[in-house]
Image (cartoon, grey):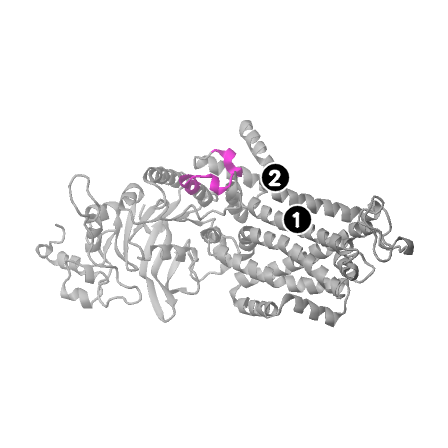
Amino acid sequence: MIGMDTKLLEIKNLSVQYTVDDDVIRAVNNVSLEINHGETLGLVGETGAGKTTTALAILGLLPVPPGKVTSGEIIYKGKDIVKISEQEIREIRGKEVTMIFQDPMTSLNPVLTVGEQIMEVILLHENISKSEAHDRAVKMLEIVGISGSRHADYPHQFSGGMKQRVMIAIALACSPSLLLADEPTTALDVTIQAQVLQLMTDLKNEFNTAMLLITHDLGVVAEVCDRVAIMYAGEIVELGSLKDVFDDMRHPYTIGLFKSIPSLTVESDRLLTIPGMMPDPSNLPEGCYFCPRCTEKKSICETIKPELIEISPGHFVRCHINLIKGDDSDECTIRG
Amino acid sequence: MSNEVKLFLTKKKNSPIQNVWKRLKRNRLAMIGLFIIVFVTFIAVFAPWIIPYSYSVQDINKRFIFPNTQHPFGTDNFGRDMFSRILYGCRYTLIIGFGCTSIAAIIGTALGSIAGFYRKVDNLIMRSVDILMGIPIFMLALSIIASLGPGMRNMMIALSITSTPAFVRIVRAQVLVVSQQEFIEAARSIGANNLHILFKHILPNSLAPIIVQFTLNVGNVILWAASLSFIGMGVQAPTPEWGLMISAGRTYLRSYWYMSIIPGIAIMLVTYGFNVLGDGLRDALDPRLNN
């Protein structure tokens, strides 16, 4: 799947800043990503790592002001989303690229029936009659596993999991090429999470839609993603195939994330955490952003920012230690 | 598929308006209010055909007749039948109440949405509204009428202007709240433009307070109009406007109290009807309060 010709979306050196009073908050810093047709990319990171900002930038939905894309390009099917007009980007939103939001409870308009809300996106983008759109909306409801007869019900008459299904129906109604799912299962309970994830994966395959799955749940990533990008303080610190990142993780932050997953087999009193806090995005450290919390840090880490280096085909890591490891494998013991 | 289609048809019968009606029916007070308003509207429309006497013909022999079977509300100081005058007066009351409030609601909703949605002109609109709100309503109405001259049309212009600021504020506040909601961002994410979002998502979600303000304002305008007519700045004699009738009766209040009390009760009833209907509508319009 991975190749030059199949690129659907290519983000090049994207930086996004929010200006609040006198503080400049560097939410996304030099992020480069690509998503291929039909592929699922997981974007993992803790709260405030810039995941949602990246997704909003892809849709051109950053709140301006205070948000602003300061540099970089977002190339979708050959068009730079950062530069095109509002009119052009509206044609992409909902038809080509759609988004599923975190909280299905507040993402549906309470005074419109779910049928009307699915029809809305169809009517906005396709030149068909209301009754045809109505039939399509009913079909979409059936596809996401809700009885079509409930199209005239209001959002408050649905449970959380069903509302998220409605959101999925809206997102997929125009068969988009790219689906941005911003923590789609965070607000749902665990059994419903599994159902919704399964539904999303099935539909993604059926519609051949690429997906950017934003989450902080590595379990979710393991289930549905082809590739994974780990974000920290607005940067990508590790990027690779699911196998690369899960079985051969290299960045100390990624390792910390995996260590903090509680194990079913090992008994422990306390959950393992990564000590410290993510740096203030308005006052980022000079060297490696993760350096203040890193257990493996060397003197070079405090002064020189590491670059994203390809350590094996398709597996990128932003860390000095891995370079040292590449030179002399005995010196590195970070993989306990 | 035919089975499905049948299901949709049965579902479709329950349109949103029917649902609102169903919920409104359960509210007894609101139904009383609605009954009063429908009743008064009916009288207003058919007044010329149902009044037993002319509302303006004077008869010096029939002055100050106390309410009896022939004249249910008695006669006034010119011998005019009060019952006919009250019935005919429904017309003026409703025209003034609905007319001024509708004008104020349309202008206020437009200005309020613009202020709340396009933040660049927010300051300009809201500060102008503040200036209007800074002047006591009655003073403002009086000065507008003083400059335009008394009369029903000018009074309606004045009362429309004084009613507008409240609508602007309510709509703007509501638009500000609703546009922060996540479903507005969701609507943007499916490619909706500003106008679409404003009309399909923001305004329908702002409707409840607008409707409540509308009904309350109709009641208020009726009272203001009566007050303005009472002091002679509004509707002019011999029009059977209720406020004017109270004013005409005040000289004889000690001996012929019914001349002022009856139109007063009429004003009170209609105002009450609008207020309770407004409250009921607010509850009925919220689909989350279903069942």
Q: Residue furthest top?
A: B3
Q: Is residue A144 above or below residue B130?
A: above
Q: Is residue A189 above or below residue A14?
A: above
Image position of A146 (left or right of B260): left
Q: Position of residue B225 (x, y in %)?
A: 71, 60
Residue A94 - label: none
- Nearest the eye: B241 or A242: B241
Residue B25 - label: 2
- Nearest the eye: A240 or A185: A185
- Nearest the eye: B207 or B90: B90
The kind of secondary structure the magenta stretch mainly shows is: helix
Start and end of the magenta stretch?
A147-165
The residue tagged with tag 1: helix, strand or loop? helix
**Residue topped by disc 1:** B273
Which three-letter amino acid code belongs to the residue tagged 1? Gly
Q: Position of residue A272 (x, y in %)?
A: 18, 50
Q: Is residue B163 above or below residue A134?
A: below
